[in-house]
Image (cartoon, helix red, strand yellow):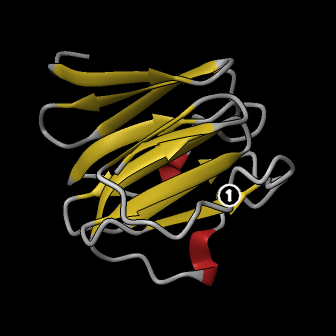
Amino acid sequence: MNKKMHTIVCGVFHSVALCSDGTVHCWGNNRLNQCDPVHLTFTDVIQVACGTQHSVVLLANGTVRCWGNNSCNQCDPVHFTFTDVVQVTCGNTYSVALFSNGTVRCWGNNEYNQCDPVHLTFKDVQLSYDHNVVLW
């Protein structure tokens, strides 16, 4: 690969790189398709994130795409219309999108209420294995 990597994020057994040209490259264990966005063409990615066994990208048009293990619906934001997203991040088995108006949408495992943010407006969201930290 002769492309300049801009950002590298890691799941448990896989890694995702965002290249300076907006393309994405994945490598590692692909048992749950976490390295296999082949069915999707990414040329305008601006951010990448990894959960334990899933990957999420934010496209330049403010939309979100996910792939990998979907056992907790962490790759399944089809229930929502995602536009105007400015940041994505992942926890163990859940994903979060921060919108330009400061609202947050979360999908996936909610075992510890990590997908039930209080109804505030946020500036930044960071996730860990099973908890969230926000700046408002």
Q: Is residue 39 visible?
A: no
Report helix, strand or loop for mark 1: loop
- Number of disc labels: 1
Q: Is residue 61 visible?
A: yes
Q: Position of residue 65 (x, y in %)?
A: 46, 60
Q: Position of residue 87 (x, y in %)?
A: 33, 51
Q: Horizontal and vertical percent for residue 99?
A: 33, 67
In the visual, does 53 lie left or right of 58? right
Q: Residue at x 82, y 46 (%)?
A: 112
- For disc 1, the neighbor class at 10 Å (few under 14, some 14 to 19, many from 20) is many
From what the image shows, is residue 86 above or below residue 81?
above
| Residue 105 point in image, percent of width and height | 52, 67
Q: Quadrant of residue 13?
A: top right
Which quarter of the figure is the N terminus placed in? top left
Q: Residue at x 59, y 51 (%)?
A: 95
Left or right of residue 101, residue 11 in this image: right
Front one among 89 and 36: 89
Above or below, comparing residue 109 to residue 119 in the picture:
above
Reading the image, the residue beneath label 1 is: 115
Q: Quadrant of residue 3?
A: top left
Q: Residue at x 44, y 24 (%)?
A: 9
The amino acid sitting under disc 1 is: Cys
The correct choice, above or below, for 97 with respect to 53 in the image is below
